[in-house]
Every structure is written in structure tokens, then in C-alpha cells.
Image (tube, grey):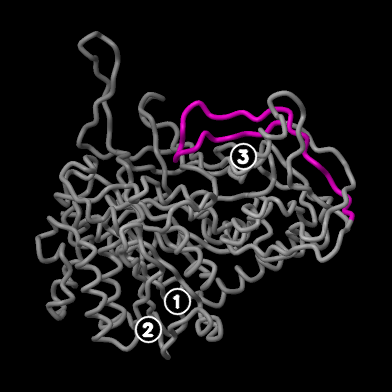
Amino acid sequence: MKKLFILILSLLPTILSAQHTWPEELIITPEKTNFEKTSTHKEVMNYLQAIQRLSKEVKVISMGKSQEGKDIPVAILSRAGIHSAAEARQSKKLIVYIQGNIHAGEVEGKETLMMLMRDILLGDKNYLLDNQVLLFAPIYNTDSNDKMEKGRRPSQEDSPMEVGIRENSQGLDLNRDGIKQEAIETQGLFANIINAWDPHVFVDLHTTNGTWHAYSLTWAPSYHYAGEYSTYDYTNNVMLPAITKKVYEKHGLRLGPYGDYSVEEGWPVKNFYTYNHHPRYLINQFSLRNRIAILSEAFAHERFYQRINSTRAFVAEILEHTHAHAAEISQITAKAQEDAIRTVKEQAGKVKKGVRFKMVSKEKLKNFITYDYVGSKKADGTATWLRTGNIISVDEVNYFGQFESVVESIVPEGYIIPATFKNIADHLKKLGIQVKQLDKAQSFSGEVYSVEKLSKSERKFEGHFMAKAEGKFIGATRKFKKGDYIVPLDQPLVNLIFYMLEPQSDDGLVTWNFFDAALSNAGINNKLVEYPVFKYYKK
């Protein structure tokens, strides 16, 4: 009886949606097809045009066009006709950006955002716009959404029957592109949303790749310990636990932190591992931008309607939280930015921050729920584990959900880049970084990085042989020419600049081969070579 009650609770949002009489043009494809199909790009665009006709509180814009020429739509939900980033900033309201379909086989977010638009603009959630401007991008990976086939995502149990593919039309994973910025979608996102609107909160909607825990949805904050701790601490220790509690109380859905485990480590499960700290992931980069971000991962093995339901419940409670705590969130992000700049002004040349990290376990997850496994033997007699249909609760599991620095570097006042590296200066600007040019020849005291070895990964990743520059810093004074680029760190994106330009960074421009040619041409295979970017402490 208890299980039946929880099931009814978990389906309540879907039941209520069915009871609400929406105009036919606002009934989404899953609802029309008994949740056997997901929406095409054309169907999403038709929906957005329809809801824009029906409400004065939404304006649909495009963040750009895809490789195949499709618009990447963004719906601006607001009061008082806020249709631009400048108007949003002037309003002093909290800005929340939520994105679906970055991986076009993971389609729950796309449908969820369209359903929530109805609830907010035409239903009983309109109060969420009292103190917030909401940006919804339901179909970020537009091209790959329509490349639908059966069997694309076996872990999703063919529910819906057909989905699109993970990569974009260039064959790139859009959630590994935050630093290198090679995808046309990433460039549009940064130019027209992230840099322009500078949202306080970012939510990225996904589906897991198949881990058999028993949570309807798992989440992660923006990991990055080269950034300010305050945004991470608030998200991980205050915001997400509160939202998790609300989702269970209101909807009967169990949520928990994101991760994966291996039965090869023994059973019951001993360790649960999160994913990564690298800012190539859009969520993680937000910590370096002094903002809050949340990763949402629906449980792949539940049916499509269940995954929409859990994602919808989670996002709705995120918006309830941001509505209730808008002033607090705005203050936290503003202070993080102030603290980052103050560190440079007061401690440049003295304080160190991490540039390479390792995953560590600093906490235990209590009463961890998962599908059970039993030991068995293969035909050749070797041991294996077989999953059962039973759900068990494990008293304690080590959670590897934090990161410690293994290499640290001194935070400088800024960096100097020779004028011949215009491509580097232009790339930094793409991410919203302020880059200037020297108006006269000038000497700087600081450090050069002497590269002893440039090693490469054996296999390509996202089209790159990932690089690592080994060497050491040496104190130096250098005179630079008029026209050379200067990147001072007393600016909002100080932590991102530091992570991108430090030569030892595990996800910086060196990693992504931006300096390969320069180091090779300078003779790195035969001698010590100076990294072209100078790190200055004094002018």
C-alpha cells in the first residue's frame, strides 16, 4: 500500500497536467503519443511561437544558428517586457538560465521546459516571475535532435522509441567544449547568453548513462576549487539538500548526488564517484565565473514519462528556491566576484591556487539506495555480478565528490601575451575576458615558465591529443612592446583566466593544443623552451 501511495505521489505532476485544459497547440509531442515520441525541432519552434502568441510575458529569441542553419531558440520569461540583457540587469532581478538537449539523446529537459513554460505563463506558477527573469533553451543541440533512430540510448529502455544523437553536426560533444569553443552552438551560447546576460544560476538537464542506483534523479553542483568556495558551498550544502527534501515531500521522488559505481570493487557498493572538475564542462565553468550551476541527471532506466516527471519536479523546485532566495543568491554571487578581485588586488604574488586536481572522498552517503546484485559464475568459471530487480539501502558509501589540488601555482597580477598571439587574445575575448594592448613599451617583473617536455595523450579526445607541459617557473624581468596584449586579473573572470593561462593547468589552453605550434617551432623537442605567456607580479 505504501509503494502504491508513493507511486501516486510521483505521478501527481503528470496527472495534474493532464487535468489542466491547455490549448491544443500547447500539447507537446510526448503527451500526444502516450510518451512514445519526443519533439522535433520544428515541433518545438511551433510550440514556442504558439505560447508567444498566447502570453505577453514571453519573448523568443535565437542564440544563433546551428551548423545546419537551424535557430537555437531561447524563451525569455519575464514581467514588464524585459527582452534584453541590458533590461534584465537594470531590473536587478535574478537571472536564471536553464538548458535542455545538450545531448540530443537525453530529451527529458526539452519536454520539461516546454511544460514549465505553460505552468508559469498560463498556469498557477506565474508568481515565479515576480523577482526573476527566466531564460529557457529547450533544444540546444538542434541538429542532432532530429537525427532520430531506435536503439540510440539502450539504457533508456527504448523509451521514447527514437531519440537523436549525442554529438552536434561537427561531431563534437557540446558538454566538453567550454574551454576550446569549437562548436558553433558554444560560440552562440557564450556570445549571446552567458557573456551577454551573465545569469546568476545555470541548470543543465541530462539523463544518466545507465548507472543502476535507485534515485529518480541525481544532481551535482559546479565543481571547481580554483574558484570561490562560496558559490559551491551554497549550492552543495544549502540549495541542493533543501530542493531534494522538497521534491521528496511534494512528489515522493528520491533524489541524490550524481555518480557511478563499479561492482568490480565488491558488493554491496563501497564507493560512489562523481564525474569531473574540468571547466570544459559548462556546469563547472560557472564556478570559475562566480556563479551558481546545477547538473541534473534523470535516471536512464525509468520510463520516459517518469524521467520527464522527475526532471520537471526538480526544475520546478529549483525555481521555487531561486524565487524564495533571489536576494540571497544575488548577494552570494556578487560577493564571490568581489572576493575574487580582492584576492588579486591584495595578495597577487603571494597566494596559490590549484591548477591540477585529484578526486577524493571526504564524506559518506547514508542509506544509499541501489538495485541489488548477486554473485554468479560465467561459463568459463570466472566470477561476475548479476543485477536483480530488488532495491536495497546501503548504510554507508564513500562518496568521491570533492577535489584536492595536486599542483598549485601563484596567482599573479596578470599575464602578458605577445602581439603575435592574436588568436589567443581573441579566444579569451570569446569567453568574456577583458584583454587590452600596451600603449607603450613597458617592463614587467614576474616569472616565465621554462618548458622541459611537452607530452601528448596517445588517443584523441574531441579531436585533440591532449597536451601537458612539464617544467618550472623562473623569476624574470621582461620588456614588452607596444601592442602586446595584457590580461590584468583584477576583473570578474579572474579565476577562469588563471585556469586557462596557467601552463600546468589540467584544462587550460595548453591542454587543448593552443600553444603546440609555438612550442614546437621554438624547438621543444631539442631544448628548453619558454612558454609564450609571461606571468607578471609588478609593472
Q: Counting other residues with Cα less than 10 Å from the Cα at mark 1, is it few (<14), some (14-19), or many (20 or more)?
A: some
**Residue 159: horizontal and vertical position, in percent?**
17, 49
Residue lying furthest top:
380
Dot 2: element: helix
Instruction: Say which residue label 1 marks.
Output: 323
User: Mark 1 or mark 2, which has the lower sequence index?
Assistant: 2
Q: Identify the residue at image location x=51%, y=39%.
A: 400
Instruction: Say which residue label 3 marks.
Output: 357
Residue sitting nearer the eye, 465 or 408 = 465
Q: Counting other residues with Cα less than 10 Å from the Cα at mark 3, is it few (<14), some (14-19), or many (20 or more)?
A: many
Quadrant for residue 78, please give it: bottom left
| Image side of residue 282 versus residue 55, left or right | right
Tags 1 and 2 touching, CB below 8 Å: yes
Give the alpha-carbon distance from disc 2 to disc 3, as whole Å: 42 Å
Q: Identify the residue at image location x=70%, y=29%.
A: 524
Instruction: Say which residue label 2 marks.
Output: 127
Which of labels 2 and 3 is toward the front? 3
| Image side of residue 274 versus residue 330, left or right | left
Q: Counting other residues with Cα less than 10 Å from the Cα at mark 2, is it few (<14), some (14-19), or many (20 or more)?
A: some
Give the alpha-carbon distance from disc 3 to disc 1, as whole Å: 34 Å
Dot 3: element: strand
